Image (cartoon, helix red, strand yellow):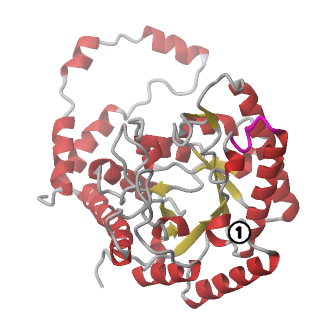
Amino acid sequence: MSKYTPKPEHKFTFGLWTVGNRGADPFGAQVRPKLSPVELVEMLAEVGAYGVNFHDNDLVPIHATAAERDQIVKEFKEACADHDIKVPMATVNLFYEPVFRDGAFTANDARVRAYAVQKTMRAMDLGAEFGAETFVLWGGREGVETDACRRPDDAIKRARECLNYLCEYNLEKGYGYKFALEAKPNEPRADIYFPTTGAYLAFIETLDHKEMVGVNPEVAHEQMPGLSMMHAVAQAWEAGKLYHIDLNDQYPGRYDQDLRFGSVSPKQSFWLVKFLEDVGYQGMRHFDAHAYRTEDYDGVKEFARGCMRTYLIFKDKAERWNNHEEIQSILAGIAETDAENLIGKYGSEAAAKLLATDFDRHELAAKGLNYERLDQLTMDILLGVD
């Protein structure tokens, strides 16, 4: 078995909507036949995934009767049990149906907002049947084409009201969900109200039960406007709010592409994997990506295998980086300059001492920092010539 073969402890998951994506785009119809949720579970077991995640309507069609719902759930549970596939996360689709054309939690129509909360509660019920511990919320329609339609602070108040309500439902039902909010700057709306992970981290602090709400950063959503996914993840981690993560890839400045993990930006993907492994992230490594439209389902399997293999390759590269003699020597030199904390906690005496310290700014600016060499050694490792 290769060291790049996925194992359960790697916690690699895919959504039904990822491997089940049929390759449609705004300019072309589907190119792959529809597979049932059971067939998709079988596929994920074949490629070595740990788990499967779903939106409510990925599993149960929105028009299903109660009897149809129960039969679908029964068959899906049996398939997951038969193939030892876990369901760590569930979510709700509040973006596809025409009723959400003006948003869900932020819509002007109070009936739409109430329906969105009801639909989310039922999705929470569904996820709980499978033991899901994380519930992701992506507000793809929570935005505008024209700000003439509402004041954005009113939209934020409405979103807060809905989140507070759902947290109370979570408590009453005893589900124990951790909510993970997923940011995106635009698409499908021209502007989405919570465009970045940082925006959601600030919003969470205003909630009644902020302890049960964190974030779900996504590579593509951070890289669309040219931001650093690793920095967003680090901020969420430092705040204790990294409840889930979506791995894929993206060319900056383009539409949401959801490309195979590491296929566009290997250097940025390497730093992300290294950070997750260095800090000991214990959550799921969820791949929210799609195979190329050119592929049949054999190609979809290669896509899924590729996401996991690339993550494990970067994990191995991170271990080499951490054990590289010259890299560690450079890092030791950096650590020496930070050995004495000259700031620390504020106090009158400490402040007086700091104000009295004579810093030679010319001397501080004169020494080269060796970052070029450090970066090239990183490239050597990534290119396999270390």
Q: Judge by depth and name the residue closer to the eye, 168 or 106.
A: 106
Residue positioned 54% across, 34% down in the render:
190
Q: How many marks?
A: 1
* Residue 8 counted in the magenta span: no
Magenta: main secondary structure equals loop
What residue sits right under mark 1 in the picture?
127
Horizontal side, residue 352 vs residue 5: left or right: right
Residue positioned 17% across, 36% down in the render:
372
Residue positioned 75% across, 63% down in the render:
124
Residue 334, compared with residue 381, is above or below; it is above
Q: Judge by depth and name the residue closer to the eye, 13 or 143.
A: 143
Among all residues in the image, which is located at the extreme right?
Answer: 172
Q: Is residue 73 visible?
A: yes
For the residue marked with disc 1, what is the amino acid?
Answer: Gly
Mark 1 is surrounded, within 10 Å at the Cα level, by few (under 14), some (14 to 19) or many (20 or more) other residues, namely many
Extent of the magenta region:
103-109
For residue 87, which quarter of the picture?
bottom right
For residue 199, which quarter of the picture?
top right
